[in-house]
Image: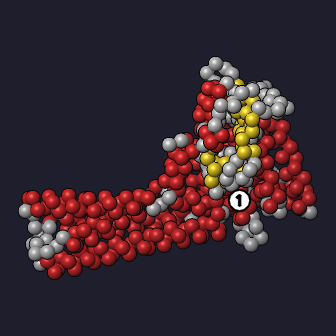
């Protein structure tokens, strides 16, 4: 099995809610057979009329089936409301929840176990099997209440933003593991192969979004063939059939096109595994929808900016790389496109500034975010932040006619409205210690 097949299987398992419940069916059948064997071997019998036991266990089985149906309906409602109120990009995160997967699996397991006990009741009633089915139902009833509580809270914007922000920090740390020194003057190296004619080109065969690629595997392939491989599309780009996928320089005639293509995973929509900008995209979409005239909820946009602030500050404190990978001997082997600091800043700020330009609350939170990052990030990150700050000030002058409103919008506020400027120094010190 090649890298792409393994990656797609792992991604499918992570994004699917049905796999664990299906396995729990087989687990329930095996468990009820083993427990019934224990009852038969030890001669354990419940002192209850068989008809009464059938009624009780049948009620348990029917109730468990109801829990399965209701919990599945709750997940579908969460998906519909989440995509409508927040963003469709949040749907996969609903299905990824381990808690929901385990709860539904427990319901299906207990239902299967209860049915298995029911068909084994004849002249006698197995003791241990009946107790497990009955008390398992009570446990699942409590678990169902916990499940409903979690689904209801998951629909809140703050919960969704918290999940995306946490996943975003994880992917930023995995893609950009090294910290950037505060006075690091280094710049990205130019692609010296951009003006060279490639020895070979490899085209894409199916439509899809680039989800991830096997960086180590491509370096190893290039090392074996003594060539330089350039991956043309960036993670997150949509690539149509027939579009350019790879350029090979210097050598590489022996490399199979299928082998190269199997090092890149394509899918229907972007994922967070190797795409740090996608976390920003989801949060910005939530903020943009909140700022739409139909919803008009600037407080949700401020909540989104809280997470954008921390994510962008984390990105700004890291070495973003230059899309170059070398082999064990120090030779360049792989070139690929990677988002730079400008991409992250424009993605995090531009749309929210445009859509929230008439909201003093949003403008004050953006001002506080930019001021904080100018204060604590390395110097090479500051010029673009100052440009965004000047654009923000120009927007406030254009949107607010009253001079007092303009001055109010130009004051940074970590809460949007209510936090003021009094706690900014303390917040900057906390941010600086987090960067260090």
Q: In which quarter of the image is residue 63?
A: bottom left
Q: In this view, does 252 lie to the left or right of 37?
A: right
Looking at the rendered image, the quarter that the C terminus falls into is top right
Name the residue: 19% across, 68% down: 130
Name the residue: 87% across, 50% down: 391
Which residue matches tag 1?
285
Q: Where is residue 189 in the image (x, y as percent from the top left)?
A: 78, 28
The image shows residue 205, relative to residue 64, as above or below, that is: above
Foreground: 428 or 366?
366
Name the residue: 48% across, 72% down: 73
The image shows residue 60, relative to residue 264, as above or below, that is: below
The image shows residue 261, relative to residue 404, as above or below, that is: above
Name the residue: 65% across, 46% down: 275
Q: Quadrant of residue 304?
A: bottom right
Q: Where is residue 76 in the image (x, y as percent from the top left)?
A: 53, 70
Crowd rating for badge 1 (residues with CA inside 10 Å; few <14, some 14–19, many 20+) = many
Tell which residue pokes out farthest to the left in this image: 43
Foreground: 422 or 412?
412
Q: Position of residue 105 (x, y in %)?
A: 38, 61
Disc 1, SS: helix
For the question of whether residue 16 can be seen, the reply is yes
Foreground: 344 or 219?
219
Q: Position of residue 210 (x, y in %)?
A: 67, 48
Tell which residue pokes out farthest to the front in this image: 254
Foreground: 298 or 311?
311
Q: In which quarter of the image is residue 21?
A: bottom left
């Amino acid at each position: 099995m090649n890298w792409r097949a393994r990656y797609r299987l792992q991604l499918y398992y992570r994004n699917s809610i049905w796999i664990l419940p299906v396995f729990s069916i087989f687990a329930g059948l095996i468990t009820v057979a083993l427990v019934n064997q224990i009852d038969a071997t030890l001669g354990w019998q419940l002192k209850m009329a068989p008809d009464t036991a059938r009624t009780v266990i049948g009620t348990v089985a029917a109730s468990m089936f109801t829990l399965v149906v209701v919990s599945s309906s709750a997940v579908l409602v969460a998906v519909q409301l989440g995509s409508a109120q927040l963003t469709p990009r949040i749907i996969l995160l609903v299905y990824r929840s381990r808690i929901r997967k385990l709860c539904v699996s427990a319901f299906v397991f207990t239902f299967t176990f209860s049915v298995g006990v029911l068909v084994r009741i004849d002249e006698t009633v197995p003791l241990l099997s009946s107790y497990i089915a009955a008390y398992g139902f009570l446990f699942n009833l409590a678990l169902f209440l916990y499940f409903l509580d979690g689904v209801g809270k998951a629909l809140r914007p703050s919960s969704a933003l918290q999940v995306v922000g946490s996943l975003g920090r994880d992917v930023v740390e995995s893609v950009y593991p090294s910290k950037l020194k505060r006075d690091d003057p280094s710049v990205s190296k130019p692609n010296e192969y951009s003006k060279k004619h490639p020895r070979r080109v490899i085209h894409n065969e199916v439509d899809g979004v680039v989800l991830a690629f096997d960086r180590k595997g491509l370096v190893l392939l290039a090392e074996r063939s003594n060539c330089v491989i350039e991956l043309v599309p960036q993670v997150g780009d949509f690539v149509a059939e027939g579009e350019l996928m790879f350029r090979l320089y210097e050598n590489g005639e022996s490399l199979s096109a299928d082998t190269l293509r199997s090092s890149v995973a394509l899918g229907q929509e972007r994922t967070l595994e190797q795409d740090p900008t996608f976390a920003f995209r989801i949060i910005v979409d939530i903020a943009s929808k909140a700022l739409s005239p139909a919803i008009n909820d600037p407080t949700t946009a401020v909540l989104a900016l809280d997470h954008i602030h921390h994510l962008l500050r984390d990105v700004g404190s890291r070495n973003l790389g230059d899309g170059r990978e070398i082999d064990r001997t120090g030779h360049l082997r792989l070139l690929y496109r990677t988002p730079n600091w400008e991409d992250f800043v424009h993605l995090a700020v531009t749309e929210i500034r445009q859509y929230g330009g008439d909201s003093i609350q949003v403008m004050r939170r953006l001002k506080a975010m930019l001021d904080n990052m100018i204060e604590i990030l390395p110097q090479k990150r500051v010029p673009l932040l100052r440009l965004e700050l000047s654009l923000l000030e120009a927007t406030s002058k254009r949107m607010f006619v009253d001079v007092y409103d303009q001055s109010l919008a130009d004051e940074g506020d970590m809460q949007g409205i209510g936090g003021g400027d009094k706690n900014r120094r303390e917040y900057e010190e906390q941010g600086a210690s987090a960067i260090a």
